[in-house]
Amino acid sequence: MPIDLTKSANWFSRAKQLLPGGVNSPVRSFKAVGGTPPVFERGEGAFLFDIDGNRYIDYVGSWGPLILGHAHPEVVEAVIAAVHNGTTFGAPTPAELELAELVVDALPSVEMVRFVNSGTEATMSAIRLARGFTGRDKIIKFQGCYHGHADMLLAKAGSGLVSFGLPDSSGVPASVTLHTLTAPYNNLAAVEALLAEFSNEVAAVVVEPIAGNMGVVLPRPDFLPGLRRLTQKHGALLIFDEVITGFRVAYGGAQSFYNVMPDLTCLGKIIGGGFPVGTYGGRREIMERLAPLGPVYQAGTLAGNPVAMAAGAATLRLLKKPGTYERLEALGKKLAAGLAEVAKKIGLPVFQNRVGSMLCNFFTDNEVIDYDTALTSDTKRYSRNFHGMLECGVYLAPSQFEASFVSLAHTESEIEQTLEAAKEVLAKEQTI
């Protein structure tokens, strides 16, 4: 029986009169899967509750930040204490130093950090810093990797392995992406060709060490070490965008998981404990090029906001406890293995990628190693699966090309309920 979303539909209709598409971020509109999005009013642990009174097991987790689950008591307590002292000062606070110490202690490549307000701000600032440090203009990014909505990063690859970037959004002049070069993910030969052709012009290579915005796509064993080798050879910086993977796949991020040290790291999501936050950091000699010490300017009125800092510090302290990532691995493995078994028994073509508590099932029989192979997925089948799971009380990402996240609030019981729902929903695909 379909779930009742009458109140959500009415609210959404009103919202579309005042908010473009009814949302403040495009994927929330359900354009990729169709239908009416539930309007949520409350989260508790592993669950979300909409204004129609429906409860869902949540595998979106606000797109990754809520690794502890919704409204964790210790995070809530830290936030309330911070708010009682004031919401923002635009001046130094003890909270930003506490979170900085936790981040620097966790990430092996980071000696100094600068807090900002979003992952987008972190990546665009890190690239400006890389350009200021190297005196070069060009950057290399990878097709299918999303680094925020800064103009220079909204570029896609052309038809060849090596191409100049073209704007991927209306409103972005071609001149803005003139210095953005693109290559296929997991393709070292393409990167090597670019660096050879523009050897003295490339300031940085920026990459999601585990891609999380074309679904979950894992780096091949030689990919990240190869990027490190090539950037060092050509005098370019290596930037890891760990906005998703930072504190998600390991306490020290993907860089510690794969033992590859970048020059600069961008973080967001988890380090804010559910509040808007970002940071970028790296070697001291690079970070000291930032104003007020150096000539690279970047500023922010709400940067280092004490409420966000308090939420982030509380989250990282909890994640540092022994057994945390072993627990996340066990839960992620149980969910992934169960979903794979269901698909296999039914005979559906599904390719699965997973690292720890982030995973993605692609509805394709191709191995997914880059953007082109991700695009072989049957998005119509994903949409049917999404809505079927939603009706069973399981909230997945409303797009084939996003990750699912398991939190510490999930238990074996929620995993089992999810697998039972998957059996029911995927079985219907046999008749289509």
Image (cartoon, helix red, strand yellow):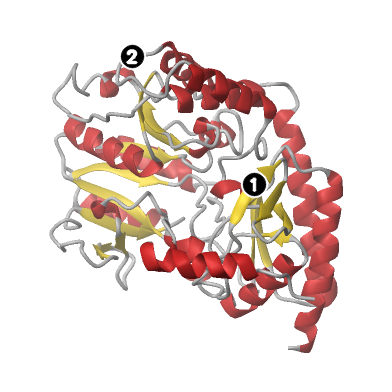
What residue did someone put label 2 on?
A: 92
Pointer 1: what residue?
42
Q: Is residue 161 left or right of residue 428?
A: left
Badge 1: residue crowd in 10 Å (few <14, some 14–19, many ≥20): few
* Image quarter of residue 25: bottom left
- Image location (x, y in percent) of residue 358: 63, 48
Q: What amino acid is found at the position of numbered circle 2 in the picture?
A: Pro
**Gap in angstroms between the C-alphas marked 1 and 2:** 33 Å
Q: In this rendering, does residue 259 appear at all?
A: no
Expressed as whole percent of the image width and height from the top left, the position of residue 111 reads: 39, 18
* Residue name at image x 73 percent, y 59 percent: 54
Furthest residue to the top? Answer: 94
Q: Element type at marker 1?
A: strand
Residue 270 located left or right of residue 122: right
Name the foreground residue: 397 vs 92: 92
Q: Is residue 63 above or below residue 4?
A: above
Q: Secondary structure at mark 2?
A: loop
Q: Residue furthest bottom?
A: 432
Q: Residue at position x 46%, y 55% from top?
A: 186
Tell me which amino acid carries mark 1: Arg
Question: Residue 63 placed where, x, y %?
Answer: 55, 49
Q: Give the number of the mark in front: 1 or 2.
A: 1
**Number of numbered callouts drawn:** 2
Disc 2 crowd rating (10 Å Cα; few below 14, some 14-19, many 20+) is few
Relative to 430, say whether 129 is above or below: above
Image location of residue 113, percent across then percent down: 37, 23
Image quadrant for the C terminus? bottom right
Whether residue 383 is visible to the viewer of this picture, yes or no, is: yes
